[in-house]
Amino acid sequence: VQLQASGGGLVQPGGSLRLSCAVSGISFSANTMDWYCQAPGKQRELVATFTSSSRTYYLDSVKGRFTISKDNLKKTVDLQMNSLKPEDTAVYYCKARRYAYWGQGTQVTVSS
């Protein structure tokens, strides 16, 4: 399994970022994909899910601001992040639900 997350950066509060995760080594369309975040000093937390049946789920604190999408042809899973808040600052990771592997994350910093 290979998971390459990208798209993080520094953004002001209220701004937007789009994270993307390129996936290889698995049957992508059959897998539920997750985005997690880990803020400094905190445990890793599930932020958004795109299931193999195309249902989506979100952490309450990001509902209405974040949107997860999955492209089975490109084998990518994206996280559109709008109306960002300082508390969204974290390293973000994508993960295929049925595999234990964690790829490198991408840092998101929301600060003025």
Image (cartoon, rainbow, N blue to C red):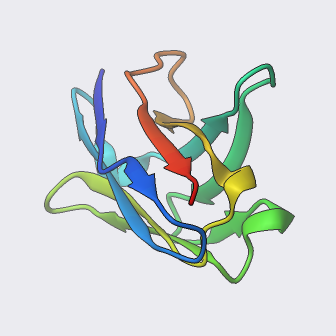
Please count the marks in the image.
Answer: 0
> Taking 61 as reference, is 88 left or right?
left
Query: Can you say whether 30 is above or below 18 in the image?
Result: above
Which image quadrant for residue 41? top right
Q: In which quadrant of the rendered image does the C terminus lie?
A: bottom right
| Residue 27 placement (x, y as % from top left) | 29, 39
| Residue 50 placement (x, y as % from top left) | 54, 61
> Taking 35 as reference, is 26 left or right?
left
| Residue 45 placement (x, y as % from top left) | 75, 37
Q: Residue sitting at 37 percent across and 47 percent down?
A: 8
Query: Can you say whether 77 is above or below 106 in the image?
Result: below
| Residue 35 placement (x, y as % from top left) | 55, 46
76 or 73, nearer to the observer: 76
> Residue most toward the right?
60
Q: Residue sitting at 70 percent across and 83 percent down?
A: 64
Is residue 33 at all visible to an observer of this figure?
no
> Taking 61 as reference, is 55 left or right?
left
Q: In which quadrant of the rendered image does the N terminus lie?
A: top left
Q: Residue sitting at 60 percent across and 69 percent down?
A: 13
Is residue 83 at all visible to an observer of this figure?
yes
> Residue most toward the front?
112
